[in-house]
Image (cartoon, rainbow, N blue to C red):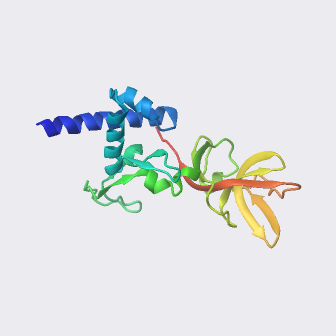
């Protein structure tokens, strides 16, 4: 019984930290963890953090700062669905999957951008979508990139031919862009997130 109470308390504290992370886009400091969890001593907060690290709920980056592990939430994978001809759907719990693990390769180098405009609609990237961008990837020809061209930001396909670089839209309404002066690539788009409701 005592163990169940401890587990419930731990889960409650984990939820508080996760909520803070989702609300503020950053991990709470140790003193903020104390406030969130009702722990008064630094020692108690340190013990809690170590416990959550052991459970891989929290992790540390290369600089030693706390980063979310599985705290950023996992979703149950119930099985597969036929996208061609209908087949009987069975709900079978195949596994759980962290959306962070699925969508993010380099956590510290990754950021989100909200899409406006329809220049990449042919690639399935629509206005209102969120794109996940990885600064740590080396951009290759054919990648969708976030680039600053002559002082303006855009999202386009990167096309390289020899020393020439062109940014190409996935919508015939838009002409290819050849940088006149300067091209800076901020990152490679690795995923698109779209909410239907």
* Side of 60 where 122 appears, left or right: right
**Residue drawn at the location 33% of the way across and 26% of the way down:** 38
Q: Quadrant of residue 10?
A: top left
Quadrant into which the N terminus falls: top left
**Residue drawn at the location 44% of the way across and 55% of the way down:** 101
Pick the front one: 149 or 31: 31
Q: Is residue 134 above or below residue 6?
A: below
**Residue drawn at the location 84% of the way across and 54% of the way down:** 182
Q: Quadrant of residue 135?
A: bottom right
* Side of 108 where 35 appears, left or right: left
* Side of 41 where 134 appears, left or right: right
* Side of 74 where 185 appears, left or right: right
Pick the front one: 45 or 147: 45
**Residue drawn at the location 36% of the way across and 39% of the way down:** 46
Residue that lies at the very extreme toward the bottom in this rendered image = 162
Q: Position of residue 65 (x, y in %)?
A: 49, 45
Q: Position of residue 151 (x, y in %)?
A: 82, 46
Residue that lies at the very extreme toward the right in this rendered image = 180
Q: Position of residue 189 (x, y in %)?
A: 61, 55
Q: Position of residue 113 (x, y in %)?
A: 61, 43
Pick the front one: 16 or 184: 16
How many numbered circles are shown?
Answer: 0
């Amino acid at each position: 019984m005592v163990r169940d109470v401890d587990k419930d308390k731990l889960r409650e504290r984990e939820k508080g930290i996760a909520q803070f992370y989702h609300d503020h886009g950053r991990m709470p400091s140790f003193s903020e963890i104390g406030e969130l969890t009702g722990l008064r001593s630094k020692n108690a907060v340190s013990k809690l953090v170590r416990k959550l690290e052991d459970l891989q709920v929290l992790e540390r980056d290369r600089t030693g700062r706390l980063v979310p592990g599985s705290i950023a939430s996992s979703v149950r994978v119930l099985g597969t669905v036929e996208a061609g001809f209908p087949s009987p759907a069975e709900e079978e719990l195949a596994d759980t999957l962290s959306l962070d693990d699925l969508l993010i390769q380099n956590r510290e180098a990754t950021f989100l951008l909200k899409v406006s405009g329809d220049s990449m609609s042919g690639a399935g990237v629509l206005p209102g979508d969120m794109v996940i961008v990885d600064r740590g990837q080396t951009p290759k020809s054919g990648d969708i990139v976030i680039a600053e061209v002559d002082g303006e930001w855009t999202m386009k396909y990167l096309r390289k031919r020899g020393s020439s670089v062109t940014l190409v839209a996935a919508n015939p309404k838009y002409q290819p862009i050849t940088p006149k002066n300067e091209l800076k690539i901020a990152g490679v788009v690795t995923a698109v997130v779209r909410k239907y409701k």
